[in-house]
Amino acid sequence: MPGKQQIEFIIKPDGSVEERVTGMTGPDCVEQTADIEHALGDVVEREHTSDYYKNQQQSDNTVSTGS
């Protein structure tokens, strides 16, 4: 049974937004957040944890967008 899926947004003082995704593995996280990222602005950095490359367990990925 998959765990809880969660997207957390951190809005920094400079207006940039950091997005943290948990509960999704591999490219699912990128696919599920594509529309949100497009609405927020250009993705300036994408950092995947090692769980991103596993097709099991929980993934925790961080994306930063510019405003």
Image: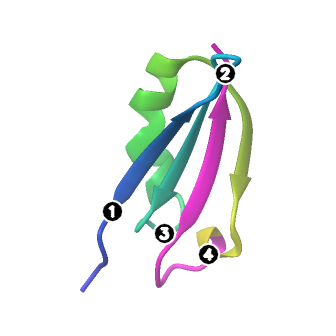
Q: Please state the horizontal and vertical placement of residue 19, each as a whole percent of the image.
A: 54, 42
Q: Give the residue number, with chain letter if any, for mark 4.
A: 51
Give the Cα separation between the discs numbered 2 and 4: 29 Å
Q: Please state the horizontal and vertical placement of residue 56, each as a whole percent of the image.
A: 48, 84
Q: Amino acid at mark 4?
A: Asp
Q: Amino acid at mark 2?
A: Pro
Q: Give the residue number, with chain letter if any, for mark 2.
A: 13
Q: Please state the horizontal and vertical placement of residue 33, each as a whole percent of the image.
A: 43, 41
Q: Is residue 48 positioned above or below 51 on the image? A: above
Counting residues from the N terminus, which is met first, the one under dot 1 or under dot 3?
A: 1
In the rendering, which numbered label is found on residue 25?
3
The segment highlighted magenta reads: 53-67
Residue found 56% across the figure and 65% down from its top:
60
Q: Is residue 56 positioned above or below 17 on the image? A: below
Magenta-span inclusion, residue 54: yes
- Badge 1 crowding class, 10 Å Cα cut-off, few under 14, some 14 to 19, many 20 or more, is few
Q: Please state the horizontal and vertical placement of residue 55, each as a whole percent of the image.
A: 51, 79
Disc 4 to disc 3: CB gap under 8 Å: yes
